[in-house]
Image (cartoon, rainbow, N blue to C red):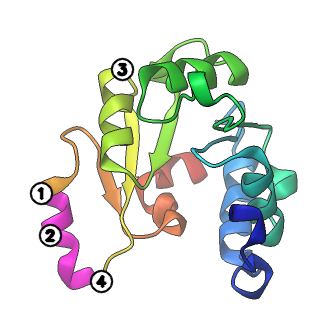
C-alpha cells in the first residue's frame, strides 16, 4: 500500500531539516545518524529520498513485513534490540532517540536511553496537554527541526 501512495506530490525536499542534520553530523558528537522506523524498507527509503535526506544517514532499521510470523515493530523490546545490534550501539544510555510515539519513547526510557525526545506536531496552544501525556523523563518538541533547542550546547 505504501508504495502506491503519490508521496512525490506531497513530500518535498526539507532544506531546514537537512541543514539541521548536517550541523548535527558536523559537531562530531554523534557517531552515527540512524533511522529506526516501523515502515517497510522501500517506503522508508522513498520518504527519505523525497525529503532530500537519503545521503545523511548511516543506516536503517525497519519492519520486515515479509516476516509475517515474526513481525517485530516498535515499541517491542526486540525491535529496539535489533536496532541496537544493526547500528552497532554499545549501550542504550549513549543513544539519542527521537520519535513521535509516546509508547516508543516510553520503551526507550525503560531500556535506559537518557536522551528521549518526543516530537508532537500540535498547535502551540495544545502543547501543555501533550506535556502531561508524554512519558516522564522525555523531552518534548513540536517539530523535529526544534531539536537544536534541546541540544544547543552540542551545536556550539
Which residue occupies 66% across, 68% down?
A: 17
Is 123 on the left or on the right of 15, as rendered? Answer: left
Looking at the rendering, the stretch of residues picked out in magenta corresponds to: 124-131
Ranked by sequence position, the earlier of labels 2 and 3 is: 3
Q: Using a 10 Å C-alpha cutoff, classify the residue at mark 1 as few (fewer than 14 neighbours), some (14 to 19) or many (20 or more).
A: few
Q: Using a 10 Å C-alpha cutoff, classify the residue at mark 3 as few (fewer than 14 neighbours), some (14 to 19) or many (20 or more).
A: some
Residue 136 pos. (x, y %): 18, 40
Is 127 included in the stretch rendered in magenta? Answer: yes
Q: Are marks 1 and 3 in contact (CB under 8 Å)?
A: no
Q: Are marks 2 and 1 in contact (CB under 8 Å)?
A: yes
Residue 152 pos. (x, y %): 49, 55
* Residue at mark 2: 128
Q: Using a 10 Å C-alpha cutoff, classify the residue at mark 2 as few (fewer than 14 neighbours), some (14 to 19) or many (20 or more).
A: few
Task: Pick the residue in front: 48 or 73.
Answer: 73
Is 15 on the left or on the right of 141, as rendered? Answer: right
* Residue at mark 1: 132
Q: Is residue 93 above or below residue 30?
A: above
Where does the N terminus fall, quadrant-wise? bottom right
* Residue at mark 4: 123
Whole-angstrom CA distance, mark 3 to mark 4, is: 30 Å
Amino acid at each position: 500500500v505504501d508504495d502506491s501512495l503519490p508521496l512525490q506530490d506531497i513530500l518535498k525536499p526539507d532544506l531546514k531539516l537537512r541543514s539541521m542534520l548536517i550541523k548535527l553530523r558536523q559537531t562530531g558528537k554523534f557517531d552515527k545518524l540512524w533511522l529506526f522506523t516501523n515502515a517497510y524498507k522501500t517506503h522508508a527509503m522513498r520518504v527519505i529520498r523525497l525529503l532530500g535526506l537519503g545521503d545523511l544517514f548511516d543506516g536503517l532499521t525497519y519492519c520486515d513485513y515479509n516476516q509475517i510470523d515474526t513481525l517485530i515493530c516498535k515499541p517491542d523490546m526486540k525491535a529496539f534490540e535489533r536496532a541496537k545490534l544493526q547500528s552497532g550501539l554499545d549501550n542504550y544510555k549513549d543513544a539519542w532517540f527521537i520519535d513521535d510515539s509516546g509508547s516508543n519513547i516510553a520503551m526507550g526510557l525503560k531500556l535506559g536511553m537518557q536522551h528521549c525526545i518526543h516530537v508532537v506536531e500540535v498547535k502551540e496552544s495544545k502543547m501543555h496537554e501533550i506535556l502531561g501525556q508524554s512519558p516522564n523523563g522525555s523531552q518534548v518538541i513540536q517539530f523535529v527541526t526544534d531539536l537544536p533547542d534541546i541540544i544547543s550546547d552540542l551545536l556550539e
